[in-house]
Amino acid sequence: MEIRKDLEPVSQYLQRLLTYGKVFDKNNVKEWSDLCYQQDYDNIYQLSFEDRNPLEEIYATGRDLAVHMSHKLEEFNYAEDYPTLKSYIESFSTGWLTEIDILEKISQTAKNKCSELGSYPWAIKMMIVLFDKQIDLLRSIRATLDIMKTSDLYKIENGELDMSTKQPNHTTNITSISNVSGKVNYQSSDHSVNINSSNVGQIFFDINHAIEKSDIREEEKQKLTAHVSELEKSHSEGNFKSKYKEFVQIVANHMGIIGPFLPALTNLL
Protein backbone atom coordinates (compact mmCIF):
# COMPACT_ATOMS: atom_id res chain seq x y z
CA MET A 1 0.00 0.00 0.00
CA GLU A 2 1.28 3.44 -0.95
CA ILE A 3 1.63 5.86 1.96
CA ARG A 4 0.00 9.26 1.46
CA LYS A 5 2.47 11.99 0.53
CA ASP A 6 1.88 14.31 3.50
CA LEU A 7 2.96 11.55 5.91
CA GLU A 8 6.22 10.72 4.13
CA PRO A 9 8.41 12.15 6.96
CA VAL A 10 7.38 9.14 9.09
CA SER A 11 6.86 6.70 6.23
CA GLN A 12 9.32 4.11 7.58
CA TYR A 13 7.30 3.78 10.78
CA LEU A 14 3.97 3.74 8.97
CA GLN A 15 5.40 1.01 6.76
CA ARG A 16 6.17 -0.91 9.94
CA LEU A 17 2.53 -0.56 11.03
CA LEU A 18 1.42 -1.88 7.65
CA THR A 19 3.70 -4.88 8.13
CA TYR A 20 2.17 -5.55 11.55
CA GLY A 21 -1.28 -5.20 9.97
CA LYS A 22 -0.44 -7.92 7.48
CA VAL A 23 0.52 -10.20 10.36
CA PHE A 24 -2.83 -9.59 12.03
CA ASP A 25 -4.62 -10.20 8.72
CA LYS A 26 -2.79 -13.51 8.25
CA ASN A 27 -3.65 -14.48 11.82
CA ASN A 28 -7.33 -13.79 11.18
CA VAL A 29 -7.64 -15.38 7.75
CA LYS A 30 -5.39 -18.40 8.31
CA GLU A 31 -4.06 -19.03 11.81
CA TRP A 32 -7.19 -18.53 13.92
CA SER A 33 -9.37 -20.12 11.26
CA ASP A 34 -7.18 -23.22 10.92
CA LEU A 35 -6.92 -23.73 14.68
CA CYS A 36 -10.66 -23.38 15.11
CA TYR A 37 -11.98 -25.38 12.16
CA GLN A 38 -9.18 -27.71 11.08
CA GLN A 39 -7.89 -28.95 14.42
CA ASP A 40 -9.36 -30.37 17.64
CA TYR A 41 -10.84 -27.15 19.00
CA ASP A 42 -14.38 -28.63 19.05
CA ASN A 43 -13.30 -30.99 21.82
CA ILE A 44 -13.67 -28.14 24.33
CA TYR A 45 -17.44 -28.67 24.11
CA GLN A 46 -16.94 -31.89 26.01
CA LEU A 47 -15.95 -29.70 28.96
CA SER A 48 -18.32 -27.99 31.35
CA PHE A 49 -19.16 -24.33 30.67
CA GLU A 50 -17.03 -23.26 33.63
CA ASP A 51 -13.99 -25.09 32.27
CA ARG A 52 -14.34 -24.16 28.62
CA ASN A 53 -15.30 -20.49 29.08
CA PRO A 54 -11.72 -19.16 29.63
CA LEU A 55 -10.54 -21.26 26.67
CA GLU A 56 -13.26 -19.94 24.38
CA GLU A 57 -12.28 -16.42 25.49
CA ILE A 58 -8.83 -16.92 23.99
CA TYR A 59 -10.30 -17.62 20.57
CA ALA A 60 -13.06 -15.01 20.66
CA THR A 61 -10.87 -12.15 21.92
CA GLY A 62 -7.79 -13.15 19.93
CA ARG A 63 -9.65 -13.25 16.65
CA ASP A 64 -11.53 -10.01 17.32
CA LEU A 65 -8.16 -8.36 18.00
CA ALA A 66 -6.72 -9.70 14.74
CA VAL A 67 -9.70 -8.49 12.69
CA HIS A 68 -9.68 -5.01 14.20
CA MET A 69 -5.93 -4.38 14.01
CA SER A 70 -5.61 -5.69 10.45
CA HIS A 71 -7.76 -2.71 9.39
CA LYS A 72 -6.73 -0.17 12.01
CA LEU A 73 -3.06 -0.25 11.05
CA GLU A 74 -3.73 1.02 7.52
CA GLU A 75 -6.28 3.68 8.41
CA PHE A 76 -3.68 6.47 8.52
CA ASN A 77 -4.18 6.65 4.75
CA TYR A 78 -7.84 7.66 5.20
CA ALA A 79 -7.58 11.45 5.29
CA GLU A 80 -11.32 11.82 5.72
CA ASP A 81 -11.02 10.08 9.10
CA TYR A 82 -7.50 11.13 10.10
CA PRO A 83 -6.48 14.38 8.42
CA THR A 84 -3.23 14.60 10.41
CA LEU A 85 -0.61 12.28 11.85
CA LYS A 86 -1.58 13.56 15.32
CA SER A 87 -5.23 12.60 14.85
CA TYR A 88 -4.25 9.08 13.79
CA ILE A 89 -1.87 8.54 16.71
CA GLU A 90 -4.43 9.89 19.17
CA SER A 91 -7.02 7.44 17.86
CA PHE A 92 -5.08 4.73 19.71
CA SER A 93 -5.74 6.41 23.07
CA THR A 94 -8.71 4.07 23.42
CA GLY A 95 -9.04 0.49 22.26
CA TRP A 96 -6.76 -2.52 22.23
CA LEU A 97 -3.51 -0.72 22.99
CA THR A 98 -4.95 0.41 26.31
CA GLU A 99 -6.10 -3.10 27.19
CA ILE A 100 -2.84 -5.03 27.17
CA ASP A 101 -3.14 -5.74 30.89
CA ILE A 102 -6.63 -7.18 30.35
CA LEU A 103 -5.36 -9.35 27.48
CA GLU A 104 -2.52 -10.65 29.65
CA LYS A 105 -5.05 -11.64 32.33
CA ILE A 106 -7.15 -13.49 29.74
CA SER A 107 -4.05 -15.37 28.64
CA GLN A 108 -2.97 -16.21 32.19
CA THR A 109 -6.48 -17.38 33.14
CA ALA A 110 -6.52 -19.75 30.17
CA LYS A 111 -3.05 -21.06 31.05
CA ASN A 112 -4.14 -21.66 34.64
CA LYS A 113 -7.23 -23.54 33.45
CA CYS A 114 -5.13 -25.70 31.14
CA SER A 115 -2.80 -26.57 34.02
CA GLU A 116 -5.81 -27.44 36.15
CA LEU A 117 -7.37 -29.64 33.47
CA GLY A 118 -4.16 -31.44 32.55
CA SER A 119 -5.72 -32.71 29.33
CA TYR A 120 -7.10 -30.20 26.82
CA PRO A 121 -7.24 -29.73 23.02
CA TRP A 122 -3.93 -29.13 21.24
CA ALA A 123 -5.58 -26.27 19.35
CA ILE A 124 -6.05 -24.39 22.63
CA LYS A 125 -2.34 -24.63 23.40
CA MET A 126 -1.48 -23.13 20.01
CA MET A 127 -4.18 -20.46 20.34
CA ILE A 128 -2.63 -19.26 23.58
CA VAL A 129 0.76 -19.02 21.86
CA LEU A 130 -0.81 -17.01 19.02
CA PHE A 131 -2.69 -14.84 21.51
CA ASP A 132 0.55 -13.95 23.33
CA LYS A 133 2.29 -13.11 20.06
CA GLN A 134 -0.48 -10.64 19.28
CA ILE A 135 0.02 -9.01 22.69
CA ASP A 136 3.71 -8.59 21.83
CA LEU A 137 2.70 -6.98 18.53
CA LEU A 138 0.54 -4.48 20.41
CA ARG A 139 3.54 -3.50 22.51
CA SER A 140 5.58 -2.97 19.35
CA ILE A 141 2.80 -0.85 17.85
CA ARG A 142 2.69 1.30 20.97
CA ALA A 143 6.47 1.76 20.82
CA THR A 144 6.29 2.73 17.13
CA LEU A 145 3.64 5.36 17.88
CA ASP A 146 5.90 6.74 20.61
CA ILE A 147 8.74 7.07 18.09
CA MET A 148 6.49 8.99 15.69
CA LYS A 149 5.60 11.39 18.51
CA THR A 150 9.23 12.52 18.47
CA SER A 151 9.06 13.47 14.77
CA ASP A 152 9.00 17.09 13.62
CA LEU A 153 5.73 16.45 11.80
CA TYR A 154 3.94 15.35 14.96
CA LYS A 155 5.49 18.13 17.05
CA ILE A 156 4.41 20.79 14.55
CA GLU A 157 0.85 19.44 14.50
CA ASN A 158 0.86 19.23 18.31
CA GLY A 159 2.08 22.81 18.71
CA GLU A 160 5.41 21.74 20.21
CA LEU A 161 7.48 23.03 17.29
CA ASP A 162 7.12 26.39 15.57
CA MET A 163 7.58 26.06 11.80
CA SER A 164 8.96 29.58 11.68
CA THR A 165 11.99 28.43 13.64
CA LYS A 166 12.77 25.71 11.12
CA GLN A 167 15.67 26.53 8.84
CA PRO A 168 15.04 26.35 5.07
CA ASN A 169 16.47 23.26 3.43
CA HIS A 170 16.56 21.65 6.87
CA THR A 171 17.90 18.12 6.88
CA THR A 172 18.62 15.61 9.59
CA ASN A 173 21.66 14.31 7.73
CA ILE A 174 24.14 16.58 9.51
CA THR A 175 27.79 16.06 8.75
CA SER A 176 29.09 18.69 11.16
CA ILE A 177 27.70 18.71 14.68
CA SER A 178 30.08 21.06 16.43
CA ASN A 179 27.52 23.86 16.61
CA VAL A 180 24.40 21.75 17.11
CA SER A 181 22.66 21.79 20.44
CA GLY A 182 19.41 20.34 21.67
CA LYS A 183 17.24 19.98 24.72
CA VAL A 184 16.09 16.64 26.08
CA ASN A 185 13.11 16.41 28.41
CA TYR A 186 13.51 13.31 30.50
CA GLN A 187 10.17 11.45 30.55
CA SER A 188 8.38 14.73 29.74
CA SER A 189 9.00 16.06 33.24
CA ASP A 190 10.76 19.26 34.22
CA HIS A 191 14.19 17.59 34.24
CA SER A 192 15.30 19.14 30.97
CA VAL A 193 18.96 19.05 30.05
CA ASN A 194 20.71 21.30 27.56
CA ILE A 195 23.03 19.16 25.46
CA ASN A 196 25.77 20.40 23.19
CA SER A 197 26.30 17.78 20.54
CA SER A 198 30.02 18.46 20.56
CA ASN A 199 30.01 16.66 23.90
CA VAL A 200 28.78 13.33 22.59
CA GLY A 201 29.64 11.55 25.80
CA GLN A 202 27.13 13.67 27.73
CA ILE A 203 24.26 12.45 25.54
CA PHE A 204 25.03 8.82 26.24
CA PHE A 205 25.66 9.52 29.92
CA ASP A 206 22.17 11.01 30.21
CA ILE A 207 20.61 8.07 28.39
CA ASN A 208 22.27 5.62 30.77
CA HIS A 209 21.17 7.75 33.71
CA ALA A 210 17.56 7.61 32.49
CA ILE A 211 17.79 3.83 32.12
CA GLU A 212 19.16 3.50 35.64
CA LYS A 213 16.34 5.62 37.09
CA SER A 214 13.64 3.65 35.25
CA ASP A 215 11.54 0.95 36.89
CA ILE A 216 12.25 -1.81 34.37
CA ARG A 217 13.86 -5.08 35.43
CA GLU A 218 17.57 -5.08 36.20
CA GLU A 219 18.17 -7.59 33.42
CA GLU A 220 16.54 -5.24 30.90
CA LYS A 221 18.58 -2.30 32.22
CA GLN A 222 21.79 -4.22 31.58
CA LYS A 223 20.73 -5.09 28.04
CA LEU A 224 19.77 -1.49 27.27
CA THR A 225 23.00 -0.01 28.62
CA ALA A 226 24.96 -2.55 26.57
CA HIS A 227 23.18 -1.39 23.41
CA VAL A 228 23.81 2.24 24.34
CA SER A 229 27.52 1.47 24.75
CA GLU A 230 27.63 -0.16 21.31
CA LEU A 231 25.92 2.88 19.79
CA GLU A 232 28.36 5.27 21.46
CA LYS A 233 31.28 3.20 20.23
CA SER A 234 29.91 3.24 16.69
CA HIS A 235 29.98 7.06 16.71
CA SER A 236 33.72 7.12 17.24
CA GLU A 237 34.23 4.33 14.69
CA GLY A 238 32.29 6.11 11.96
CA ASN A 239 29.41 3.66 11.47
CA PHE A 240 26.87 5.45 13.67
CA LYS A 241 24.14 5.76 11.03
CA SER A 242 23.72 2.01 10.47
CA LYS A 243 24.01 1.27 14.19
CA TYR A 244 21.44 3.94 15.01
CA LYS A 245 18.79 2.28 12.82
CA GLU A 246 19.54 -1.05 14.47
CA PHE A 247 19.45 0.57 17.91
CA VAL A 248 15.99 2.11 17.39
CA GLN A 249 14.58 -1.27 16.39
CA ILE A 250 16.17 -3.07 19.33
CA VAL A 251 14.90 -0.61 21.96
CA ALA A 252 11.43 -0.22 20.40
CA ASN A 253 9.73 -1.63 23.51
CA HIS A 254 11.44 0.93 25.75
CA MET A 255 10.58 4.17 23.97
CA GLY A 256 9.21 5.60 27.21
CA ILE A 257 12.85 5.76 28.32
CA ILE A 258 14.78 6.21 25.07
CA GLY A 259 12.25 8.25 23.07
CA PRO A 260 13.01 11.65 24.68
CA PHE A 261 16.66 11.30 23.61
CA LEU A 262 16.01 10.46 19.94
CA PRO A 263 16.15 14.12 18.77
CA ALA A 264 19.63 14.49 20.30
CA LEU A 265 20.75 11.20 18.76
CA THR A 266 19.43 12.09 15.31
CA ASN A 267 21.53 15.25 15.46
CA LEU A 268 24.57 12.96 15.47
CA LEU A 269 23.64 11.28 12.17
Image (cartoon, rainbow, N blue to C red):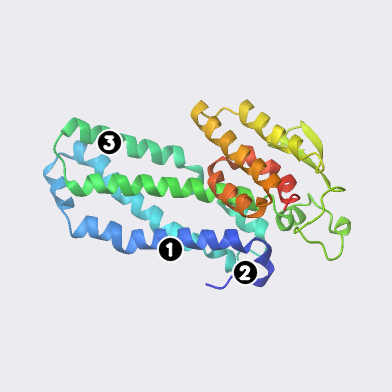
Q: Which dot, 3 or 1, sits closer to the camera?
A: 1
Q: Is residue 255 left or right of residue 175?
A: left
Contact between marks 1 and 2 (CB within 8 A): the answer is: no
Q: Which residue is mark 3?
A: 111
Give the image location of residue 265, x and y in percent: 71, 46
Give the image location of residue 6, x and y in percent: 69, 68
Give the image location of residue 102, x and y in percent: 42, 38
Q: Hey, what amino acid is under mark 3?
A: Lys
Lower position in the chain sequence, tag 3 or tag 2: 2
Q: Hey, what amino acid is under mark 2?
A: Glu
Q: Residue at x 83, y 66 (%)?
A: 169
Element carrying mark 3: helix
Q: Which residue is mark 2?
A: 80
Give whichever of 173, 37 is nearer the camera: 173
Residue that extends furthest to the left in the rendered view of this protein:
46
Give whichever of 86, 185 is nearer the camera: 185
**Is 180 rendered above or below residue 191?**
below
**Is 114 rendered above or below residue 140?**
above
Q: Residues within 10 Å of mark 2 (few under 14, many from 20)?
A: few
| Figure quadrant of residue 39 | bottom left
Element carrying mark 1: helix
Element carrying mark 2: loop
Q: Hey, what amino acid is under mark 1?
A: Lys
Give whichever of 18, 237 is nearer the camera: 237
Q: Which mark is residue 22?
A: 1
Q: Which dot, 1 or 2, sits closer to the camera?
A: 1
Q: Which dot, 3 or 2, sits closer to the camera?
A: 3
